[in-house]
């Protein structure tokens, strides 16, 4: 399995296996804490080889700088169909978040796990605005 895209953005959409991503970012500025961010999306495009056909579990965690989960993990299952003639299969994951809460400034992370194994992380920096 290869990760082609793993990003935090303002908006993403999967339209017939075509992934649209708008407004990628890694920082948020807030005047006071706790802070709330109205909406964002984690967009991910995964590529599986024909040898990886079958069911795969995924989990997306959001953690603070100490590694503590800040939201309930998002978990699910994806079924990768067998690809013909050595072709590969791509899967788009689009996970929307509304009203994310941040207790203090600092580094937060989105972490992607496939079949229980950590695959990648996305930093998100919460900054105190002046």
Image (spheres, helix red, strand yellow):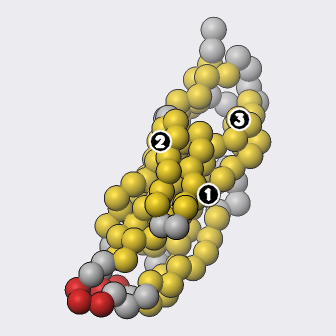
> Is residue 127 something one can see in this rendering?
yes
Examine the rendered structure and indicate whether residue 20 appears above or below residue 79. Answer: above
Left or right of residue 51: residue 68: right
Which residue is tagged 2? Answer: 123
User: Picture coordinates of residue 100 (x, y %)?
Assistant: 72, 43
- Sequence-first disc among 3 and 2: 3
Q: Percent x, y for residue 123?
A: 47, 42
Residue occupied by mark 1: 95
Quarter of the image that includes the N terminus: bottom left
Observer-nearest of 17 and 64: 17
Mark in the foreground, 1 or 2: 1
Of discs 3 and 1, which sits in the foreground? 1
Farthest residue, direction front: 16
In 3D space, how far apart are the residues under numbered discs 3 and 2 (Cα atoms)?
15 Å
Residue 22: % across, % down: 52, 40
Q: CA distance from mark 1 to mark 2?
A: 16 Å
The image quadrant of residue 64 is top right
Query: Considering the numbered disc 2 on the image, is that residue within a helix, a strand or a loop?
Result: strand
Q: Is residue 128 above or below residue 6?
A: above
What kind of element bears circle 1?
strand
Q: Secondary structure at mark 3?
A: strand
Lateral position of residue 47 relative to residue 11, left or right: left
For marks 3 and 1, the one nearer the N-term is 3
- Where is mark 3, residue-wise? 37
Which residue is depicted at the point 48% across and 67% down?
Answer: 17
């Amino acid at each position: 399995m290869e990760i082609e895209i793993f990003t935090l953005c303002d908006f993403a959409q999967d339209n017939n296996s075509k992934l649209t991503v708008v407004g990628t970012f890694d920082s948020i500025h807030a005047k006071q804490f706790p802070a709330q961010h109205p909406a964002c999306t984690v967009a991910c495009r995964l590529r599986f080889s024909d040898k990886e056909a079958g069911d795969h579990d995924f989990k997306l965690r959001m953690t603070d700088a100490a590694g503590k989960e800040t939201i309930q993990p998002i978990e699910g299952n994806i079924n990768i169909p067998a690809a013909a003639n050595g072709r590969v299969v791509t899967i788009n994951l689009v996970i929307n978040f509304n009203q994310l809460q941040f207790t203090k400034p600092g580094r937060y992370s989105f972490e992607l796990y496939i079949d229980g194994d950590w695959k990648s992380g996305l930093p998100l920096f919460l900054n105190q605005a002046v």
